[in-house]
Amino acid sequence: MLVRDAMSPLVVEVGPGHTLRQAARLMADRNVGAAIVMDPDGAGPGILTERDVLRAVAAGEDPADVRVSSHVTTSVVYAEPTWSLDDAAAAMVDGGFRHLVVMQGPDVVGVLSVRDIARSWAGERGLLDARRNAGGAVDHGVVGIA
């Protein structure tokens, strides 16, 4: 299976001048874990992830005032749509990140997340169908805080 088969073509784009709150709102509205940061003065697209926003809030920064530019990752690993999912997963493990920006030439064509890879591999192996045929969701022992 290839990156193009698993990636999300839904790309949330923000600029470096957006606030973290604006970026987080767009990400939440579209149910994605990363936004592509397009800076006309930058060398290429950057990425802002939900983890970046979480770290800023945990550090006491006000997401309504802090700009994306202060938390954007610019040393991004770009995947190509023709990469195998195995190669993409290896790049994520090697780099310690959960999202890849998918580029075709100079254009951003998608984002690939760890979740996308897991969903694709589970579907490819028939795990999703087996779970659905067994009656739905599986209890994974997740406990919330009361």
Image (cartoon, grey):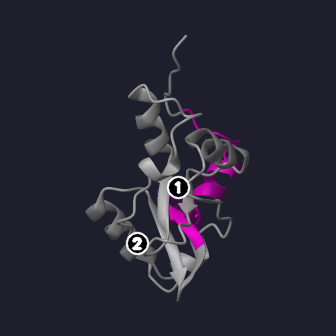
Q: Residue furthest bottom?
A: 105
- Badge 2: residue crowd in 10 Å (few <14, some 14–19, many ≥20): many
| Foreground of the two, 57 or 130 | 57
Residue 90 screen position, x and y as percent: 32, 69
The secondary structure making up most of the magenta span is helix
Does the magenta-highlighted stretch encompass residue 121? yes
Residue identified by numbered label 2: 88
Real-space CA distance between mark 1 and mark 2, rounded to the nearest whole angstrom: 12 Å
Residue 93 screen position, x and y as percent: 31, 61
The local secondary structure at tag 1 comes to helix
Depicted 81 relative to depicted 74: above or below? below
| Foreground of the two, 45 or 6 | 45
Q: Residue furthest top?
A: 146
Residue 66 screen position, x and y as percent: 51, 39
Residue identified by numbered label 1: 115
Please give the name of the residue rendered at 68% of the width and 65% of the height, measured from the top-left corner.
Answer: 10
For the C terminus, the quadrant is top right
The local secondary structure at tag 2 comes to helix
Please give the name of the residue rendered at 56% of the width and 66% of the height, measured from the top-left corner.
Answer: 38
Residue 26 screen position, x and y as percent: 68, 48
Depicted 127 relative to depicted 52: above or below? below
Please give the name of the residue rendered at 45% of the width and 82% of the height, measured from the top-left corner.
Answer: 83
Please give the name of the residue rendered at 55% of the width and 72% of the height, measured from the top-left corner.
Answer: 40
Does the magenta-highlighted stretch encompass residue 122? yes
Left/right placement of residue 51 relative to residue 127 reads left
Q: Amino acid at mark 2?
A: Ala
Q: Amino acid at mark 1?
A: Arg
Depicted 98 relative to depicted 111: above or below? above
Q: Give, as a single range, the part of the protein colored magenta.
A: 110-139
